Amino acid sequence: MPVSLDIRRTDAPIATMSTRQRTQHTTHPRELRWLVPAYPRIAHLPYQPNAARDDLIASEAEAAVVFGAARLTVTEKFDGACLALARHNGVVVAATKHHVLRKGYQKATQAKQQFVDVWRWCDEHRRRFEYLERAHGGPISVFGEWLRTPHTVRYLAATPRFVPFEVYDTTLRAFLDPLLAEDLLRAAGFAVADRLPIERVTNWEDLALLARGATPWSALDAREGVILKIGDGEKITHRFKMVRPDFVRGQFFQVRG
């Protein structure tokens, strides 16, 4: 469980150290998958799902757990690339759902080029990761949305480059309860998605209104949708999503190659 430490919070980037030791591993990236595991797929709620052919859709029985859930959070679903970040022996480890990324790997596609400055960004904000490890009392990984390249929602320039949404405890091999993770991330200086104004879910229609609502992070587009998470006080137990009906994935993004 997280403990309270007297550690000064810092939001400001610090000077980058560009030594080889700080930026590269001698370990093959695949051997670090235990630190940044593949993020679980999230099922769409069954109410009017805007789902692709291979997406998961929860049944009515599976989704019923959200009604009256005590530790429920509903947040904006950001339209970026899912990215896991951690530090191992002082070196940044980054991974998508499918691959542990290798620093210096170059491929001329948007899907790969959007990650070229991940290591620099992490190095500039390394105190946030150091705080998380100290406050939680052990190695952790941070999962979030990497928003360097527009996909469909055109975010304002002031939108954070990385918006974390979960914390993974590598010892327990579990994602922390959403409320615990939010407290840790905010204390470390990360910008996280604010919880939306709904305390209890009683019907799908209220969620659908939130899913297609305005986002403070774009002057041009509505939010992609909403994410619902339930915890038991220690770890996450359930995840669901609802995407607005008119959302078209990858409208401004080339994913081939």
Image (spheres, rainbow, N blue to C red):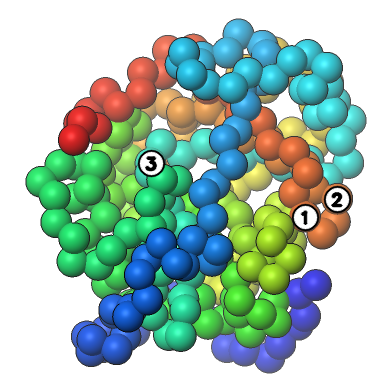
Distance from disc 2 to disc 3, alpha carbons, whole Å, reads 28 Å
- Give above or below for 254 relative to 85: above
x and y, in percent, of residue 180 in the image = 74, 61
Note whether residue 99 is visible.
Answer: yes
Query: In the rendered image, which quarter contains the N terminus?
Result: bottom right
Disc tally is 3
Sooner in the amino-acid sequence: mark 2 or mark 3: 3
Sooner in the amino-acid sequence: mark 3 or mark 1: 3
How packed mark 2 is, by other alpha carbons closer than 10 Å (few <14, some 14-19, many 20 or more), is some
Element class at badge 2 = loop
- Residues at discs 2 and 3 in contact (Cβ within 8 Å): no
Q: Amino acid at mark 3?
A: Gly
- Give above or below for 149 relative to 172: above
Q: Along the line of sight, which residue is nearer the eye, 163 or 197?
A: 163
Say which residue label 1 marks. Answer: 235
Say which residue label 3 marks. Answer: 80
Q: Along the line of sight, which residue is nearer the eye, 138 or 151?
A: 138
Say which residue label 2 marks. Answer: 232
x and y, in percent, of residue 64 in the image = 83, 21
Q: What residue lies at 36% left-to-right and 23% top-to-bottom?
A: 249
Q: What residue lies at 14% left-to-right and 56% top-to-bottom?
A: 106
How packed mark 1 is, by other alpha carbons closer than 10 Å (few <14, some 14-19, many 20 or more), is many
Element class at badge 1 = loop
- Looking at the image, residue 140 sits to the left or right of residue 31; the answer is right
Q: Amino acid at mark 2?
A: Asp
x and y, in percent, of residue 111 in the image = 24, 42
- Looking at the image, residue 30 sits to the left or right of residue 41; the answer is left
Note whether residue 12 is visible.
Answer: no
Q: What residue lies at 45% left-to-right and 46% top-to-bottom?
A: 97
- Residues at discs 2 and 1 in contact (Cβ within 8 Å): yes
